[in-house]
Amino acid sequence: MTRLLGHLRRTGLGLLSPSLLLLLLVFLIPVAIMVPLSFRPYLPGQGIGEGWTLANYTKLFTDAYYYEIVGRTIFLGLAVTLLTLVIGYPLAYFLARSRSRWRHWLTILVVFPLLLNLVVRTFGWMTLLANRGVINLALQDLGWIEQPIRLMFNFTGLLIGLTHIFLPFMVLVLIGVIQNIDRDLEDAAKVLGANWGTTFLKVTLPLSLPGIVSGSILVFVLSISALVTPRLLGGPTYKVMSTLIYDQFLQLLDWPAGSAMALMLTLIVLVLVFLSGVIARRFGMQGSVAQG
Amino acid sequence: MATATVTRPSLHIAPRLRRAGLGIWVVLVYAFLLAPVVVVVLASLSTTSYLTVPPEGITLRWFFEVLEDPGYVDAILFSLVLALIATAGSLLLGTAAAYALLRRAVPGGEAISALLMAPLVFPGVVVGVALLQFYSLIGLSATFAGLAFAHMVITIPYVVRAILASLAGTDSNLEDAACVLGANRLVAFAKVTLPLIRPGVVAGGLFSFIVSFDNVPVSIFLLGVRQTTLPVKIFTAIEYGVDPTIAAVSTMLIIVTGLFLIVAERWIGFHRFI
Amino acid sequence: MEPRNRALGEGAAADLRIERLRKTFGAVTAVDDVSIYVQHGEFVSLLGPSGCGKTTILRMIAGLIEPDSGAIVLAGEDITQRPVHRRNLGLVFQSYALFPHMSVFENVAFGLRRRPVAEDAIGRRVRAALDLVRLGAHTDRLPRQLSGGQQQRVALARAVVTEPRLLLLDEPLSNLDALLRDEMRVELKRLQEELRITTLFVTHDQAEALTLSDRIAVLSEGRLEQMGTPEAIYHSPATPFVAGFIGRSNLLDGIVVGQAEQGVRVRVGEGLELVAAASGPLRQGDRVQASLRHERIHLTEAPTPGMANSFPGRIVFRAFAGAVTQYVVQLAGGVELQVETPTAAGRLEREATVQVELAPEAVILLPAAVPAA
């Protein structure tokens, strides 16, 4: 017995066991239990039926309603990732290379929206994007448009909202990446005759590529998992995978179908996180997406 | 070195333009990032009972309405208590876990570390629905305990990450020195290591509190009929229609979060942990 | 048992016996069957290059690492299984390991506070310890406000204030610059003699080990090569490693070819024969290594009568090194020797012909190096 205790103490497993137990019981096992449930049929009005079926999965690929939502979610994720990258890179470069004493506060300012309640942020966008929202009213007052532009309950609204939410993530990852690129390398390129553009394209960008990929995977994974923002900015009819899961569990009560969709979402996320880890190891970066 | 080089000012326009361009871009991005926040604050001050920005007149009445609404007050208190308990739990568990991962030779340490960090990228909605089912099987549905455990799961990664960062910057010899001087491992940790990782503990606790307080995807599936957290309440309120009280309570959250951040930066140099 | 410094209270120094200590880390054997005995009050150095296992041994004695096998016996008690915090030893780390968030006073008091010592006694003993290392005025400072030498002295005071029966020092002087190191060496020795603590000192610097120690344990690759007084180690190295590591010597492979009046004849190189005053049985045909210390080879103008080893040579290299001058001399048979002579003895130029002489006692014979497998 004392040998076991000694072993637990030495390897640190004793200290880890409460956390591991928590994650096992409240995370791994519940998710694992969804797997059998996803193969059960659902009988409307009666609940979960007996027997097994693949229908919950096959309809994700055969039923237009479903695969349109899946496709929309993925496309949205890609678009958000691209936008946050393009918008965020210059800001990240500015903050990473800045020598100003305000640098820390400016970085905190980027983080500030991140720590704000998601609902609050999304609410802010609703106020801005609604048909009678700030943007439309302002544009109408200026005489630039007659009718309000539909900026909510569609792809545009979700794109704007999600880009806003995840921009700080991308910026923070990129700051880390750019800071790791030795300034001397850029200076060396300039001394050797490269102008700013060439230096950027041939030195800075290639060296930040692993980090860009890692940050992109992070933002993509988070965007396709988002619930609150798509729900509020997309409304009850314009759905993505997360909001569909939400509806199925809380409104339609079709738990098997919801589980299948949830597991599919999980699979996509896990594959991408694994990929990100492979890339990180391949390029010798510290940790993976999850430790971003 | 005698000869001086003559620099011609006109050659430096390009870098200046570039810097100006970058500066403008940066300002625009910050404007984009902060626009919703500004809008919400402005909306909360409007005298009209429907939402207008810019506000027609300034009033603080919506704030008072929020504070006098028992529904809101209950939700705020509930969220507070939940966040405090979840944070306490994850600080305890997470600090122990981080210490073990860094200072002990844990078999399969990388896998365990990945598991602990998993809730960071795992879709919250999936965790929520998984627990909805699981809890209904084991009788923890709509219980505070179930909710608290769920929140601990999603906040532990932040604690572990912050403590690892702090711990990595301390010398492991210090604890050894304390032990040689007669302190057992626990006393050595408490008197030597803990004071030195205080920034990590504070940062981890802050992240954990905010993540728990703000959470919707997990909480919304696990709440019972008569309990609600503040963000879930706001969320469901918005689904019924927007009005300035929502803006008011949102502004309150904005102010509190802002204060937290300023204090954290001043006290422990929070920017090191993000 | 000698009385200890009264200001620090009473306490008896213990003797330490390490028996067949062994530790492997994965595929690497860090400590291979090492046994050492340290008498009470003795100052013993563990000397060797990095990776020889000396720090591992020290940490095992302190209890910070568990040995795979072997025993650690302090004053007759087996402490191998005892937890770190109950061994009552003193340990000075290479990095000092001063608690950065505590004042000098609190650092030194830390060990006392873990014991049932009254508050006023703590104050008295802390101040006495700091006076001992001559830092009495700095009790309220934080470690980062002190210089390297001062920090080291605080670490020392902290280690001895609890009156440990054994003091362990892990390369405590290696972080100091040369001048400070010499100063601290003297202070350390003075302190140890005053307190009469049994002391184990880990270092890779042979000069330190030679000046400070009562005895030295020379280690290489986890094994004890030789243990003895500084003089014994220096003049009579037992293995080629010790001969090469201590002092500077020329190592030549050779074969015993016969007897001579003053010892044995050894042929080294092509046709060069040395007379060595050997002890121990050596037969014709035995393969040996001859170790010739740089400073024991003399360069003269003409052969000295009666000198058994006297050969003509030519100076091929010269380097002035302050108090001594180093030469490389080429002898017949393709043998080159490095020689060190006091600068005051005169200066020899390159290409000069000299007579290279050394006494038979200066030729140390060692077992031939085992060829690598």
Image (cartoon, coloured by chain):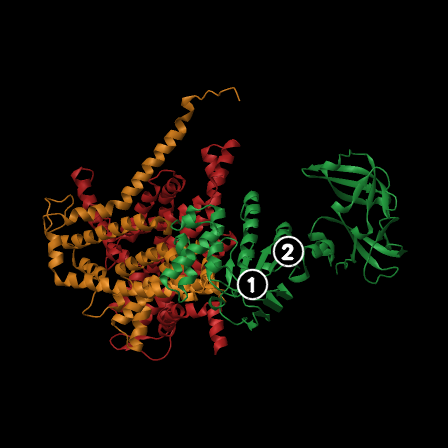
Q: Nearer the viewer, residue B238 or B24?
A: B24
**Mark toward the start of the polypeptide (2 vs 1):** 1
Q: Is residue C263 left or right of residue B3?
A: right
In the picture, one chain is green; tell me its letter.
C
Q: Position of residue C259 (x, y in %)?
A: 89, 57
Query: Which residue is located at x 34 percent, y 49 percent?
Result: B269
Q: Is residue C108 left or right of residue C290?
A: left
Q: Are marks 2 and 1 on the same chain?
A: yes
Chain A tint in image: red
In which image quadrant can residue C332 be found? top right
Chain letter for the residue marked with disc 2 in the picture: C
Question: Closer to the camera: disc 2 or disc 1?
Answer: 1
Look at the numbered disc 1 and give the secondary structure of its residue. loop
Residue, disc 2: C48
Q: Position of residue C53 (x, y in %)?
A: 61, 60
Q: Position of residue B254 (x, y in %)?
A: 22, 51
Tag shown at residue C2: 1
